[in-house]
Image (cartoon, coloured by chain):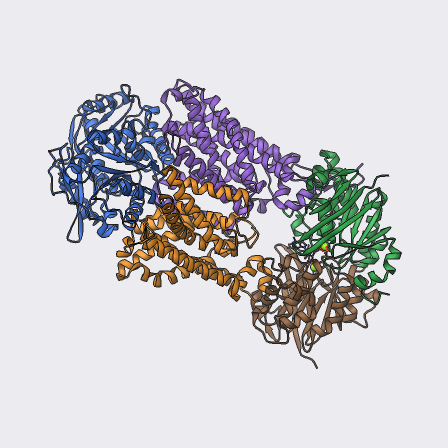
């Protein structure tokens, strides 16, 4: 029985407007094959995959407090599974992507058991070492090209769809679908009871456990689910790249450092942050990448400047100025009138 | 007439957009014990953080021994002889008890307080001197915090909620020791919730209410009614 | 109006392989000057626009920029050079997008088998010219034969595309070495950027090796070479691929660089000239040295030759609007370039043709090191410039 | 004998890893700063050594007299000008800022020194060797190991037996309160970074003598440094040395089994140790 | 009737410091037990042992008839044990209301509207409603202590462990706190309360235990305990407070 003159809301006007705008944008994006050029579609596809990686990493680091610098382990694992399952298992690429996710979840279980014994910076370094073990391990598998790497046979790519245009649309839709799926899954999860528990763990583990939260299990679930999705994204990435090698598959720069850059620049611990971060990252890359060393130096400077001037990221800056929340997660107590 | 050691002139303090102190005027004379009382959130801790430089404040809002210490960093203020026993103890967990005490001496001021003097005041600390400071009980930690502040031989020492979480016997000991702790010429500002206790040890008292001074007076003359009015405002 | 033909170019301008592309700007400037008046095709003049992108020595990035050139810039021909890390991802993107592609500066086995090429089938749109492991082996055996060193060879092969190809039991060094009566001591594939080679050194010492060979990156070789001396291992001949290509590496080794041997794919003394500019190998190399103040490097010739082939293809293609016609023109190439003849009809395998290879030794002349050709049995047209000296 | 050789060589290699790690261990212990740029700073040290030796013709070990103070100064300025602003409870700001720094240093070195591999020439020291009990050992690795011991002994002494060390630990525990004790945290952190980069300079020069380097080579070495720190346990520099030696020996023994296992074996040793002792072997500070 | 909580020969030491020395006692449902003892006696440690934040070296803990000695802290919370921390442990990045929601959803297992209603009720009761939308990290020490109480209540506990929540209160505030705790107790919640503010404690509890050096040195009705010379000496100081 509620005797107080207060009530609780979880939405806002801005969020409702944003939802409508989001739906319109989604329809426009789905229709991209009819209005965008091939290069644009490929670029957007890549952007969606990075967005998915960033959203997943943000779930782990921004909400579960699991700062991993080893997610490239699952990107590479997923990529290698795509190659192995299609080349040796004869699977259709789409089936291989799904199975890569399941295998990613399975392999992440023993890894989690091991690295969950570590905290904070130790955890971060531990995940990195695990990813290195994956890299060096796959470098020993000569069937997959060992340290030399391997190319995806053209026939397998063509089995996705025989027409080039169809294939390109399909890759694009897969990437878009992945991003939409990942973002909605994370959003719904965070609004759920388990999501609330996750945020509590991030803030204070001792208090969380004494309030009935099974810390290990909650983190474990997040880790395994994130790894599964990451492996699927990895498979999608290497379906586009067509070629895999240990250094490329398990690149800490490409699959983790840039992802951390995206999330932190955008605003960690918010769903909006990775979206903004991804846009900024691609904007920088597309305009400056031809400058070579200068581009990389600019990237480094941006990372430093944003961190110093806006430690909550760009979205944090926007939010503090306008009190905006597009994906409302919190609760607000208001007085009933 | 005793010399005035600290003067606050229209002191303001902010946490981001939130203003916690509004034009606070206070002074404390050398050798005096000043009590500051006030409800929770009145701004007592904020006042102490401003004096010690942990919160920034403007020029000429705080004068120590005649000099403006408004814009100085906390470590510079400490060197000038202002020490604090913070709310909630806040010891250095990776230092032993003895090292916690010794770090207090690092400002390099001369005076009567050294390790031996502190051990004499709190003998249990000598027993525990090589233990990690966090493994002490709350009360023992409070003793270390007091000892640590004394080690810097300050001329002004600030106690924020010194009896919070202490057993009555310890509180009694500490208050009994207070005149000895303060000694010749050292002044103290005490923030205390136990009003009776605060009035008993101090010569003057200020009451804060929502960031403003709502009462000032000699401790032995203020009345209960005045205090409770100053606490909660006039309804 | 003059139509424009777009050529995309990918190379590792930055990152650990940047040495291979250090002369890119110089070479491209020369090529652009030579093509400034346009090229004639079927009586029509075409502008040539070269768009160059950096792979950052990273295969992921190489695939991205290749896709970008193909889909975004819609280049008509794509070219790439310098190690499998750049060549293979670019070729793969070209193959799937059916864009004509020419590559070089990567032994053909890692190019062909590294891309899962099937002998007899090959690829549809992608072509490669360089030498192969059989040439390296031939040149090395030729040189070692002159040395009189014991026929015990220590092998140092990393677990990367080149190392695996060189050390491969079937296609690499082991079989031909055995056939020529050499004992190859091969402890296995090490991971690049290892900090310790004592186990190799111990194994080579135990076996009494007097020759060391392999394919390494410069820091690994430097580590090995210092440790070898510290641990009392002094071979008579050290012949290493890749690591010993660049004069800067040899200089960094100081006196210990004197007498090291390597394969030579191109040098100012090669008796070839550019089909595009008429410049001789010497002209090209000296041009770079005088412009940059840096010593010449072997990739300069191949980078230049890559665009010679492009120019030749552009002139001959039946229809420059049609990728298939361009591919047909590539396949029909028969051109004498600054690195030797390029003719895919003579290839050892589909889509691959080979240029001549000799063996050379870094010899100290005054203050600087010179790469002297010391063995040329497989390419006698390239003159020997000095005799092989033994180490130690 | 081969096994003994592998173990001895691995131990000496561990000295180098411990030097890579000592600076990291110090700043991680004092500031909880995970410095991604540490590997690149080692390389920077090597390049400074190169510049000094080519400009003056000094022996690289003599060049330390110039490079060590130079790196210390860089460390102090870097800390006060940049890194101090990133410190707090959160792991990420320093992680991202040092990542940015790493990219900047790498590419600036590439612009300044090109991608050419470089080496510091130490003359006879590079190849000198001596024999003990049937083993031939390099003088350089032995000197490196001895320097590692000296450096670590020095750091450990500073950390646990001096007022500066006490100040390091106090500031690392609670910055606000340490300031109340008259400690200027910005200055103290600056000193910690200066000390760390002084050690880094030594590591960089010894690396530059041992093998050739180019601007991109730092990142690969970084992970070994972190592993050594963690194996040893936070706040215990002798532990860091032990961690380095464990890594080195695991690598040489792994390589003895199969050269492909060399680096992998080091990582696996690290994981096994952490599985058993999540705070490392000899922690003095809780992580 | 089975005791709600039963400690049997509970043992815990940190090196040479013994914080629980063979402790055995029982708490019946509906009891209100006070805990006194000098600083460092092991009172907070006893709470840590009961809630599972610390693992004992020996002995057992039974709750509601079940042996919970090896249960995780989370499981104990689900079964109805709640506590406040002496040093407050808020989820500083969440609002006060969300802090309460954690307790209501995770420990009490409530969903949606039911959880929200419970939290609003408790916030009202503990006087934190005006701070409901404020980040917990920006609360003052005393507000944090109230938040501790709020969260503990939102777990709908059977057993409530309170660790020094009356310290630092003004007289008026103290009276209102006492009233709140009495109400909670009257609502059927069993309470164990560690407190140095003795008069507050005495106005609520019906039994006292005294701990020193980890040992139970006295147990009984408050009146007897406060009169005992031993307690006067080690806890209150020789001359008892007037
Ligand atoms: N870090 C902070 N950020 C924002 N506001 C703060 C912060 N610390 C304190 N405040 C606010 O400043 C005001 C004064 O707080 P202060 O801690 O000085 O009170 P106090 O008198 O010491 O109270 P208490 O008796 O509870 O310790 C309060 O309203 C509090 O909410
Ligand atoms: N993690 C730990 N490691 C070592 N010793 C500890 C640890 N936690 C507590 N102690 C020691 O156990 C003793 C009891 O501590 P505890 O916090 O239980 O005391 P307490 O009775 O709650 O005291 P207070 O009234 O001051 O809060 C203290 O002497 C303390 O030094
Ligand atoms: Mg306060
Ligand atoms: Mg306690």
Chain D colour is: orange
Q: Nearer the viewer, residue D23 or D245?
A: D245
- Colour given to chain C in the rendered image: blue
Name the quarter where the C terminus of chain E is drawn. bottom right
Q: Which chain is brown?
A: B
The answer to whether D116 appears left or right of D249 in the picture is: left
From the viewer's perspective, is C37 left or right of C62?
Answer: left
Which quarter of the frame holds ligand 2?
bottom right
Nearer the observer, D184 or A39: D184
Chain in green in the render:
E
Q: Residue furthest front?
A: D133
The quarter of the rendered structure image containing the N terminus of chain E is top right
Residue C117 point in image, percent of width and height: 31, 23
Residue farthest to the top?
A: A162
Judging depth in this view, the residue of A127 and C198 nearest the camera is C198
Towards the viewer: D141 or C86 = D141
The image position of residue D213, as x and y in percent, is: 32, 49
- Percent position of residue A181, x then y: 54, 29
Can residue D257 be seen in the rendering of this structure? yes
Asked if B124 appears above or below B65 in the picture, the reply is above
The relative height of residue D144 versus residue D253 in the rendered view (above or below) is below
Chain drawn purple in the picture: A
Circle count: 0
In the displayed structure, A296 sits above or below A151; it is: below
Choose top left, top right, bottom left or bottom right for residue C320: top left
| Vertical comparison of B38 with C85: above or below | below
The quadrant in which residue E78 appears is top right
Does residue A69 show up?
no
């Amino acid at each position: 029985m509620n005797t107080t003159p207060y009530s609780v809301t979880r939405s806002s006007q801005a969020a409702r407007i944003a939802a409508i705008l989001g739906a319109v944008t989604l329809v426009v994006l789905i229709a991209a094959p009819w209005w965008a050029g091939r290069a644009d579609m490929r670029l957007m596809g890549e952007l969606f995959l990075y967005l998915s990686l960033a959203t997943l990493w943000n779930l782990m680091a921004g909400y579960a407090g699991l700062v991993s610098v080893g997610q490239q382990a699952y990107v590479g694992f997923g990529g290698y599974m795509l190659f192995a399952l299609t080349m040796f298992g004869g699977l259709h690429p789409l089936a291989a992507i799904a199975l890569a996710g399941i295998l990613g979840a399975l392999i992440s279980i023993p890894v989690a058991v091991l690295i969950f014994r570590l905290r904070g910076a130790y955890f971060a370094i531990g995940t990195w070492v695990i990813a290195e073990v994956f890299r060096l391990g796959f470098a020993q598998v000569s069937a997959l090209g060992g340290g030399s790497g391997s190319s995806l046979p053209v026939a397998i790519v063509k089995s996705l769809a025989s027409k080039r245009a169809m294939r390109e649309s399909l890759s694009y839709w897969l990437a878009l679908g992945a991003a939409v799926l990942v973002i909605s899954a994370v959003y719904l999860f965070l609004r759920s009871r388990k999501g609330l528990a996750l945020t509590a763990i991030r803030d204070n583990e001792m208090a969380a456990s004494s309030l009935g939260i099974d810390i290990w299990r909650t983190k474990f679930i997040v880790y395994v689910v994130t790894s599964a999705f990451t492996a699927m994204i990895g498979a999608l990435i290497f379906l586009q790249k067509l070629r895999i090698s240990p250094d490329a598959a398990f690149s800490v720069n490409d699959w983790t450092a840039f992802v951390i850059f995206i999330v932190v620049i955008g605003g960690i611990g918010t769903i909006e942050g990775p979206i903004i971060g991804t846009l900024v990252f691609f904007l920088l890359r597309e305009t400056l990448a031809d400058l070579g060393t200068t581009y990389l130096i600019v990237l480094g400077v941006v990372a430093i400047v944003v961190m110093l001037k806006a430690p909550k990221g760009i979205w944090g800056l926007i939010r503090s100025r306008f009190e905006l929340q597009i994906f409302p997660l919190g609760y607000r107590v208001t007085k009933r009138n | 007439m005793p010399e005035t050691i600290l003067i606050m002139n229209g002191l303001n303090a902010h946490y981001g957009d939130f203003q916690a102190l509004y034009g606070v005027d206070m002074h404390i004379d050398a050798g005096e014990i000043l009590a500051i009382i006030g409800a929770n959130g009145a701004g007592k801790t904020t006042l102490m953080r401003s004096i010690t430089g942990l919160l920034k404040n403007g020029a000429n809002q705080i004068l120590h021994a005649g000099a403006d210490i408004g814009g100085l960093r906390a470590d510079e203020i400490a060197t000038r002889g202002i020490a604090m026993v913070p709310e909630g103890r806040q010891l250095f967990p990776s230092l032993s008890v003895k090292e916690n005490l010794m770090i207090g001496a690092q400002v390099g001021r001369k005076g009567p307080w050294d390790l031996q003097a502190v051990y004499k005041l709190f003998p249990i600390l000598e027993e525990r001197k090589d233990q990690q400071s966090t493994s002490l009980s709350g009360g023992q930690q409070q003793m270390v915090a007091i000892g640590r502040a004394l080690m810097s031989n300050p001329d002004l020492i600030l106690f924020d909620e010194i009896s919070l979480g202490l057993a009555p016997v310890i509180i009694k000991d500490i208050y009994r020791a207070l005149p000895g702790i303060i000694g010749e010429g050292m002044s103290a500002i005490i923030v205390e919730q136990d009003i009776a206790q605060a009035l008993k040890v101090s010569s003057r008292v200020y009451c804060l209410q929502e960031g403003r001074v709502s009462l000032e007076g000699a401790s032995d003359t203020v009345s209960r009614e005045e205090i409770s009015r100053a606490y909660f405002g006039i309804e | 109006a003059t139509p424009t033909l777009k050529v995309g170019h990918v190379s590792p301008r930055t990152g650990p392989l940047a040495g291979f592309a250090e002369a890119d700007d110089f070479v491209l400037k020369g090529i652009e000057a030579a093509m400034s008046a346009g090229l004639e095709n079927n009586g029509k003049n075409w502008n040539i626009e070269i768009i160059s992108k950096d792979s950052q020595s990273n295969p992921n990035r190489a695939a991205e920029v290749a896709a970008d050139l193909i889909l975004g810039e819609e280049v008509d021909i794509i070219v790439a050079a310098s190690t499998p890390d750049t060549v293979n991802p670019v070729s793969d993107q070209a193959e799937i997008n059916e864009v004509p592609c020419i590559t070089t500066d990567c032994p053909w086995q890692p190019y062909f088998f590294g891309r899962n090429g099937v002998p007899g089938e090959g690829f549809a749109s992608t072509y490669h010219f360089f030498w192969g492991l059989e040439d390296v082996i031939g040149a090395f055996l030729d040189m070692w034969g002159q040395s009189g060193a014991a026929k015990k060879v220590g092998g140092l092969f990393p677990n990367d595309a080149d190392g695996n190809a060189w050390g491969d039991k079937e296609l690499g060094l082991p079989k031909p070495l055995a056939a020529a009566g050499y004992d190859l001591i091969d402890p296995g594939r090490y991971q690049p950027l290892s900090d310790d080679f004592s186990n190799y050194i111990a194994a080579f010492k135990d076996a009494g090796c007097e020759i060391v060979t392999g394919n390494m990156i410069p820091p690994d070789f430097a580590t090995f070479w210092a440790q070898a001396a510290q641990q009392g291992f002094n071979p008579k001949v050290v012949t290493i691929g890749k690591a010993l290509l660049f004069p800067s590496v040899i200089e960094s080794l100081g006196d210990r660089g004197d007498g090291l041997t390597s394969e030579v794919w191109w040098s100012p003394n090669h008796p070839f000239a550019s089909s595009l500019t008429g410049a001789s190998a010497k002209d090209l190399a000296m041009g770079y040295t005088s412009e940059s103040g840096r010593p010449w490097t072997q990739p300069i010739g191949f980078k230049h030759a890559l665009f010679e082939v492009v120019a030749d293809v552009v002139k001959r293609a039946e229809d420059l609007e049609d990728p298939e016609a361009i591919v047909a023109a590539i396949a029909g190439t028969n051109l004498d370039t600054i690195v030797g003849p390029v003719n895919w009809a003579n290839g050892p395998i589909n889509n691959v043709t080979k240029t001549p290879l000799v063996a050379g030794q870094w010899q100290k002349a005054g203050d600087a090191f010179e790469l002297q050709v010391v063995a040329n049995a497989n390419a006698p047209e390239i003159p020997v410039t000095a005799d092989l000296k033994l180490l130690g | 004998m081969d096994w003994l050789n592998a173990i001895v060589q691995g131990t000496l290699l561990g000295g180098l890893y411990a030097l890579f790690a000592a600076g990291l261990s110090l700043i991680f212990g004092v500031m909880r700063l995970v410095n991604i740029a540490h590997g690149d700073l080692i390389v920077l040290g090597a390049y400074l050594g190169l510049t000094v030796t080519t400009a003056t013709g000094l022996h690289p070990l003599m060049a330390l007299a110039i490079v060590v103070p130079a790196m210390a100064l860089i460390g102090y300025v870097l800390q006060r000008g940049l890194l101090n602003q990133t410190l707090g409870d959160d792991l990420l700001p320093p992680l991202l800022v040092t990542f940015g720094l790493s990219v900047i240093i790498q590419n600036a070195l590439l612009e300044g020194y090109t991608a050419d591999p470089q080496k510091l020439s130490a003359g006879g020291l590079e190849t000198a060797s001596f024999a003990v009990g049937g083993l031939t050992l390099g003088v350089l690795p032995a000197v490196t190991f001895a320097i590692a011991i000296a450096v670590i002994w020095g750091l450990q002494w500073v950390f646990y037996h001096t007022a500066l060390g006490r100040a390091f630990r106090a500031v690392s525990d609670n910055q606000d309160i340490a300031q109340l004790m008259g400690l200027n945290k910005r200055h103290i952190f600056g000193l910690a970074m200066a000390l760390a980069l002084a050690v880094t300079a030594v590591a960089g020069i010894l690396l530059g003598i041992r093998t050739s380097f180019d601007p991109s080579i730092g990142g690969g070495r970084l992970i070994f440094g972190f592993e050594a720190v963690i194996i040893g346990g936070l706040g215990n520099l002798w532990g860091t040395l032990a961690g380095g030696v464990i890594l080195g020996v695991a690598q040489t023994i792994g390589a003895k089994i199969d050269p492909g296992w060399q680096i992998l074996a080091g990582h696996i040793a690290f994981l096994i140790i952490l599985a058993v002792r999540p705070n490392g072997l000899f922690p003095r500070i809780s992580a | 009737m089975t005791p709600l909580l039963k400690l049997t020969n509970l043992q815990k030491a940190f090196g040479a410091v013994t914080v629980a020395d063979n402790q055995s006692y029982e708490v019946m449902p509906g009891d209100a037990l006070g805990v006194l003892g000098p600083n460092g006696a092991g009172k907070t440690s006893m709470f840590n042992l009961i809630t599972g934040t610390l693992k004992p070296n020996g002995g057992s803990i039974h709750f509601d008839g079940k042996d919970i000695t090896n249960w995780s802290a989370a499981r104990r919370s689900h079964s109805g044990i709640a506590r406040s921390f002496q040093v407050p442990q808020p989820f500083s990045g969440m609002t006060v209301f969300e802090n309460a929601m954690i307790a209501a959803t995770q420990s009490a297992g409530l969903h949606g509207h039911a959880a929200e209603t419970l939290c609003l009720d408790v916030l009202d009761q503990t006087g934190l409603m005006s701070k409901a939308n404020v980040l917990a990290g920006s609360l003052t020490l005393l507000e944090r202590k109230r938040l501790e109480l709020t969260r503990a209540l939102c777990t709908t506990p059977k057993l409530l462990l309170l660790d020094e929540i009356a310290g630092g209160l003004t007289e008026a505030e103290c009276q209102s706190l006492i009233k709140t705790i009495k109400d909670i107790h009257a609502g059927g919640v069993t309470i164990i309360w560690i407190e140095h503010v003795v008069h507050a404690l005495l106005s609520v509890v019906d039994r006292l235990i005294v701990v020193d050096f980890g040992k139970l040195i006295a147990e009984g009705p408050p009146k007897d305990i406060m009169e005992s010379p031993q307690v006067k000496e080690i806890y209150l100081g020789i001359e008892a407070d007037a």
